[in-house]
Image: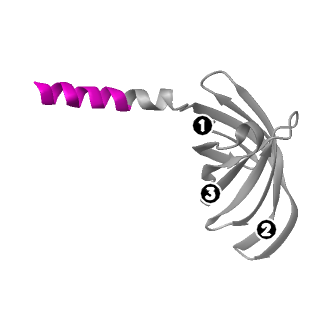
């Protein structure tokens, strides 16, 4: 019986840990466009590098809405997808969070939050989204320190 109570207590403690540690489910939507593009293409081959710029709205499960303008240097290959990193800057404060991302050729993307400045210092999380010609939406976790 003691082992059962100990196991149950540990299990319930693990379930409660994300809420106590500031675990936040998040949704996000964005729109943007590639600028400063350099491309090489021939037939079915196309590879480019440039900067993806736009705006993002991230909504946390707490109801907090984070508006950012983003600048994302990256590359894209028509057959394999691409990757890059973004400075996601809150225009009202100048605070930013960093997103490292990877997408497959069909626009299914994943990203990891790599910290930030100001209120985003120590931020972490993981997001998944679908990119459709510069517009996208998805969900994941976004944790503030």
Q: Main secondary structure of the magenta part?
A: helix
Image height of 56 relative to 40, above or below: above
According to the picture, the residue beneath numbered tag 3 turns out to be 103
Q: Which residues are magenta?
A: 1-14
Q: Cα distance, mark 3 to mark 1?
A: 22 Å
Question: For the view shown, which residue lies furthest in the top direction?
Answer: 63
Identity of the residue drawn at 62% across and 58% down? 102
Choose between 117 and 106: the one closer to the eye. 117
Callouts 3 and 1 close, C-beta under 8 Å: no
**Left or right, residue 18 beside residue 40:** left
Callouts 2 and 1 close, C-beta under 8 Å: no
Image height of 31 relative to 101, above or below: above
Name the secondary structure under disc 3.
strand
Q: Position of residue 44 (x, y in %)?
A: 69, 73
**Left or right, residue 7 beside residue 20:** left
Nearer the camera: disc 2 or disc 1: 1
According to the picture, the residue beneath numbered tag 2 turns out to be 49
According to the picture, the residue beneath numbered tag 1 turns out to be 143
Name the secondary structure under disc 2.
strand
Name the secondary structure under disc 1.
strand
**Mark 2 nearby-residue class (10 Å; few <14, some 14–19, many ≥20):** many
Identity of the residue drawn at 79% across and 68% down? 49
Find out whether residue 30 is within the magenta segment: no
> Which quarter of the figure has residue 93?
top right
**Mark 1 nearby-residue class (10 Å; few <14, some 14–19, many ≥20):** many
């Amino acid at each position: 019986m003691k082992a059962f109570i100990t196991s149950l207590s540990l299990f319930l403690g693990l379930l409660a840990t994300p809420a106590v540690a500031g675990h936040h489910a998040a949704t996000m939507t964005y729109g943007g466009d590639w600028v400063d593009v350099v491309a090489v293409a021939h037939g079915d081959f196309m590879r480019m590098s440039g900067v993806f710029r736009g705006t993002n709205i991230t909504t946390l499960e707490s109801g907090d809405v984070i508006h950012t303008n983003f600048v994302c240097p990256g590359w894209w290959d028509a057959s394999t997808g691409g990757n890059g990193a973004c400075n996601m800057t809150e225009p009202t404060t100048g605070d930013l969070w960093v997103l490292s991302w990877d997408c497959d050729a069909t626009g299914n993307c994943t990203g990891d939050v790599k910290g930030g400045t100001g209120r985003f210092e120590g931020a972490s999380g993981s997001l998944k989204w679908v990119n459709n010609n510069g517009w996208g939406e998805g969900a994941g976790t976004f944790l503030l320190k």
